[in-house]
Structure formats: structure tokens, C-alpha cells
Image (tube, helix red, strand yellow):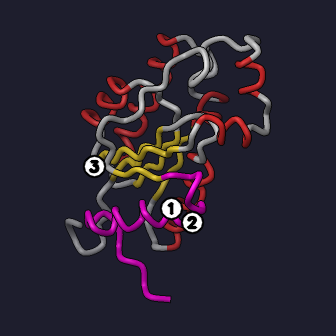
Amino acid sequence: MNHQNEQEGFVVWMTGLSGAGKTTIAHVLVDELKARGLKVERLDGDVVRQSLTRDLGFSKEDRDKNIERVTFVAKLLSRNGVACICSFISPYQAVRDQVRAETTNFIEVFVDAPLDVVVQRDVKGMYKKAIAGEIENFTGISDPFEPPVNPDIHVHTDRETVQESADIILKYLEKRGLIPVAAAA
């Protein structure tokens, strides 16, 4: 950290299939970072699509545009000392690399869960519809998901609890000096 109380901004970018656990982990991270006195914002695919990008669909071009707009917001926040917790499927490596290039202290987190597990977890029935051909351009079914080639952090939500996955991310942020180390309980 630069000055005594000045927070350095960063972007925790969680990528993974729908249902892998990105949003759930994001909520835990936000609570923990706020408890440590940090300025933090959460950018989430579903939330962003209700406001900032509601005009966009799910074609590759629209997905790229969606991430482009989110990147702009994350860039402004991170360069102004805000911790940005982002959860987006963001299926394309080239797009994630672009986000890394444009934001401050970008950390790519692969929130990984096998397809059969996310299909099981699917409360909205989206995978079922996609498998039946009722939803076009569905990531992991009719559209590709490019797993991160070299993520900064790789969590496995099929074998870790939400808290364990969040703790892996927090430890990484502590080690990088981006957040204060948690006081021992």
C-alpha cells in the first residue's frame, strides 16, 4: 500500500460457467473486505445487465460489448483506489486479457466447477433449456467457454466450501499487499 491509509485499487475478475459460484463467492469477499475497512464495489453479470447493458443480448459481439463497458467501470474504480469484485462468465480469453491490460492490479480467478455439477446446481433451469435447444448461445452448451490459460487463482467449487474458495482469494490479496492481513480470531 502506498500511503499509510491510502487503499490501492484492484480488480478481482471471477470467470467461470453459469452456476460455478462466482456471485456467491463475490458476496463473501465484499463482506470481508468491507469488514477490513476497504472501499469495495461488486460488479455482477446479472446486475449489470439490468442497468448498464440491458440493451445487449448474448451474441459474441454483445458479450464482448458487455465486458467492454464493465471494463470501463472497473478501470475507473480500480485506478481510484476501490477494490472491484467482478463476477462475469466472460468466456473468451482474449477479452479477459483486454480487461487485464486496462485495469489496475487485475487478478483473474477461475471459479471452476465441472459441467455436470453446474447443471445440477441450476436453479433457474437455464442449462436444461439450453441442452434442449431452447436457448441459443448458452456458454458451456452451445457456445464455447475458454478456461483461463494461466489464472492468478484457481478455485474448485465442487470440492471447496464457499468460505474456503473466498479464503484462497483473500490470502492471495494479502500476499500481494493489496489488503490488510486479517486479525487473528
- Circle 2: is it few (<14), some (14-19), or many (20+) Cα within 10 Å? few
Residue 64 position (above or below residue 77): above
Give the amino acid at mark 3.
Asn
Q: Nearer the viewer, mark 1 or mark 3?
A: 1
- Find the residue positioned furthest to the left: 2
Is 62 colored magenta in this rendering? no
- Find the residue positioned furthest to the bottom: 185
Q: Nearer the viewer, mark 2 or mark 3?
A: 2
Q: Residue at x 27, y 33 (%)?
A: 102
Q: Position of residue 59 (x, y in %)?
A: 55, 11
- For the residue pair 149 and 26, the one nearer the viewer reads as 149
Q: CA distance from mark 2 to mark 3?
A: 23 Å
Number of marks? 3
Is 175 colored magenta in this rendering? yes
Q: Please state the extent of the stretch shown in magenta in the rendering.
A: 156-185
Q: Position of residue 163 (x, y in %)?
A: 57, 66
Residue 125 position (above or below residue 31): above
What residue sits right under mark 1 in the picture?
166
Residue 52 falls in image quadrant: top right
At numbered mark 2, what does the secondary structure look like: helix, strand or loop? helix
Q: Residue at x 59, y 43 (%)?
A: 20
Give the amino acid at mark 1.
Ala
Badges 2 and 1: C-beta atoms under 8 Å apart? Answer: yes
Left or right: where 29 falls relative to 6: right
- For the residue pair 123 and 37, the one nearer the viewer reads as 123
Give the amino acid at mark 2.
Gln
Report if residue 65 is visible in the image. Answer: yes
At numbered mark 1, what does the secondary structure look like: helix, strand or loop? helix
Q: Which mark is residue 105?
A: 3
Q: Position of residue 87 (x, y in %)?
A: 52, 41
What residue sits right under mark 2 in the picture?
163
